[in-house]
Structure formats: C-alpha cells, structure tokens
Amino acid sequence: MSIAGILCRFVEGVYIPFEGDESAAKVGNSRYTRHALFFGKVYPPMHHKLSYAEARAYIDVMVAAMVCDGVMRQQELERLIANVAARPSLRKFDPEQIERMINTSLTEFQGMTRARLDNKLAAIANTLKSTPNRKDALRMAISVMRANKEISPKALTFLRRLATALGIDEAEVKKLLQNNDG
C-alpha cells in the first residue's frame, strides 16, 4: 500500500467532532463525511472550474517535488495533503480521487528518465495555461520541498527545470523561494 493510501486510511479512521459547525447537519451525506475526515473540516462541494486535468497537474507537480531528490518523506506527503486542503478548487474532488491522483503520479514519477520528465513537465505547463496557475504550482512544489526544512541540491535542480518548463524566470523563482515560508 502506498504512503498516500496509508495516510488517507489513517485520516479516514479519525473521528472529528462537528459541534457548533453549521454544516454539521449535512454530515450524514458520505461526501461531506469524507471531506470532513480527510481535510479536518466540513466543506460543501466546491463548484470551481478546475478540471480533472488541471488538478492532476497540480498533484503531479507536488509529487514530482516530493520524489525529485530520491527520498520520499512523510512530512512531504503531509504538506502535499495540506496544500490540497488549502485550495478550494482542489477540495471539490473526493479524497478517493485525490488518493488515486497521488498514487498514479507516484507510479509515473518514480524512476522517470530525464527526457520523460521534461516531456511530463511540458505537458503540465500546457495544462496550466495561466501564469497565476503556473506560479501556484511552483509555490506548491516549493512548499512540499520545504517540508524537510532544507531544499536539497537535487530538488533545486528539479525546481529550475520545472520553472523553465512553466516559463517562470529565475528572478521570480528566487522571489518565491524567499516568500515561501514552508
């Protein structure tokens, strides 16, 4: 079982009381319950216009950031989940969908060659067309890398490649690195 699966099952097994929450009446619906258990709060389904492909691109960027140094740590996965929970447009997906996206991305990125990585990063850039979305993706990647407190040289190399693929200049990357408190 993958780390994402273990974490998802752990979080699903935790009971979170909903006292005082106005949306607690809706908790009987399994979708609300899954959101509450996975994200720690009851969120009604969001109706943002983020497509599955765009959500996958964000997940792909964070998973690639997680495995780029060759070591995947629990803190990185927890930060990835926190990034998903903090973004309303990603919360519209069920935890099971997010888990499948993470597992698929983990399978794709582990052992990926440089040429395939460059092709994948180009595909991600093609999916995330707007500059704000691309900067958000880069910010999320930096956040995942910062879960370990220090960004490794391999991770910095990956970050440069990601920024190049996304069309973000080096000055902007430095600014994001300074502003991202991780």
Image (cartoon, grey):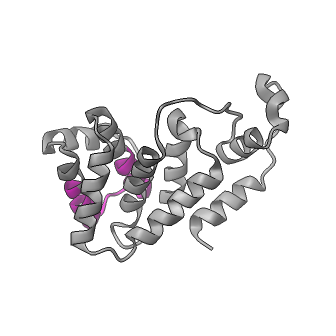
Residue 12 % position (x, y): 74, 54
Task: Give yes or no for residue 102 being in the magenta stretch.
Answer: no
Residue at x 57% of width, y 29% of height: 47
Image: 69 above or below 54? below
Residue 116 % position (x, y): 26, 69
Q: Using the rendered image of the protein, determine whether residue 85 is visible from the camera's viewpoint.
A: yes
Q: Using the rendered image of the protein, determine whether residue 74 is visible from the camera's viewpoint.
A: no
70 left or right of 56 in image: left
Instruction: Answer with the quarter of the image where residue 123 lies.
Output: bottom left
| Nearer-the-camera pick, 140 or 117 | 117
152 left or right of 148 in image: left
| Nearer-the-camera pick, 176 or 162 | 162
Instruction: Answer with the quarter of the image where residue 17 lies.
Output: top right
State the quadrant of the C terminus. Answer: top left
9 left or right of 173 in image: right
Residue 141 % position (x, y): 36, 51
Extreme residue in the top direction = 22
Residue at x 31% of width, y 58% of height: 151
Specify start and end residues of the magenta stretch as a single range.
140-161
Image: 130 above or below 146? above
Residue at x 34% of width, y 49% of height: 142
Considering the whole magenta stretch, tell me its main secondary structure.
Answer: helix
